[in-house]
Amino acid sequence: NLPLKMTDEEFKILWTRIHAECEKLGIAIAAGHTGRYGGVDYPMIGGATMIGVTTRDQYVTPEMAEPGDLVIMTKGPAIETAGILSTMFPKVIAEAYGKEFVEKAQSIFWLQTVVPDALTLAKIGLRTGVTAMHDATEYGIWGALYDIAKASGVGIRVYEDKLFIRDDVLKVINAFSKFTSIEVDPYTAISEGTLIATVKPDKADLVIKLLRDKGIDASVIGEVTEDDNIVLVKKNGEEFEVPLPSQDPFWLLFFKTLDILRSRGGTE
């Protein structure tokens, strides 16, 4: 489903890109539906269902994490949030940091894939090395951790001093937080491109090395427990349970930014 205002030329660019990525990943497009509809708008357009075929022991799901596994995060939080906001509203970035930072901020957009991350992890052995993988989409890092814990019937303990966030992502989040006067926890923000994985302890160092060799930042941020909750251990040793976020801040930032810019007579 496409926005009414999308031109044929814009659609050609979009579909050419989809075709190129499918060719690169060996994906066959079997069927589809294309049309322009009212009520459909940026930044999200379209959707797809993908089906893969493999053997019974060559896949993992979020329900396969086990107590004792270590938890790995790639790239850090809010990748999708920063990438989309920078691309949609470059004026906000330019006002905050100058035009020279806009291109760097917009380059975050291209980090929105976990394919390299997942393929790298798969090399160490599915189930024998990697037990679960899940991308950090809605509700970000905490949402992904909650999904894995809920699906696997386990708990997860996360250590604050092991968490990290990219400097460019943090600058983007801070810019939009200040612009909209909305306080944002980056770890609750949608982050397509970030992979959360659980691995056997004896494989963790190898996983981190392989990821970093590919230029992918990664860290062991915690461990799987026998509990049924998500616990954050603060740097001072204090522990508290992390609830599932009630709302993803991306949408608050997006629509508040849109409203402010429209009130100024523009949307870019």
Image (cartoon, rainbow, N blue to C red):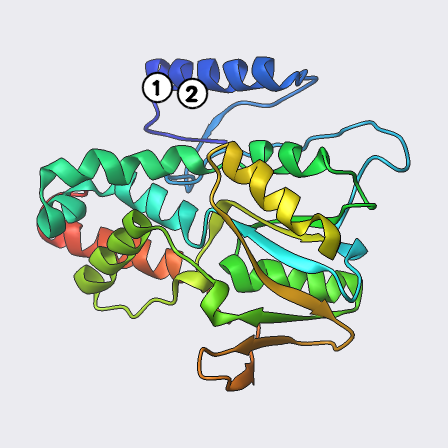
| Residue 55 can be seen in this image | yes
Q: Where residue 202 sits: x, y (%)?
A: 74, 52
CA–CA distance in space, label 1 to label 2: 6 Å
Residue 173, quarter of picture: bottom left
Residue under pointer 2: 14
Residue 89 appears left or right of 190: left
Marks 2 and 1: in contact by CB < 8 Å? yes
Indicate the quadrant containing the C terminus: top left, top right, bottom left or bottom right. top left
Extreme residue in the bottom direction:
238
Q: Where residue 233 sits: x, y (%)?
A: 53, 78
Q: Amino acid at mark 2?
A: Leu
Mark number displayed over residue 1: none
Residue under pointer 1: 10
Extreme residue in the right direction:
56
Instruction: Provide the secondary structure element on which disc 1 rests.
Output: helix
Q: Where residue 86 sits: x, y (%)?
A: 27, 43
Give me the residue at 78% from left, 66% from top: 67
Frontmost residue, 191 versus 255: 191
Give me the residue at 46% from left, 38% from top: 112
Frontmost residue, 72 versus 21: 72
Q: Where residue 84 sits: x, y (%)?
A: 35, 42
Instruction: Provide the secondary structure element on which disc 2 rests.
Output: helix
| Residue 248 can be seen in this image | no
Frontmost residue, 135 versus 268: 135
Residue 221 appears left or right of 125: left
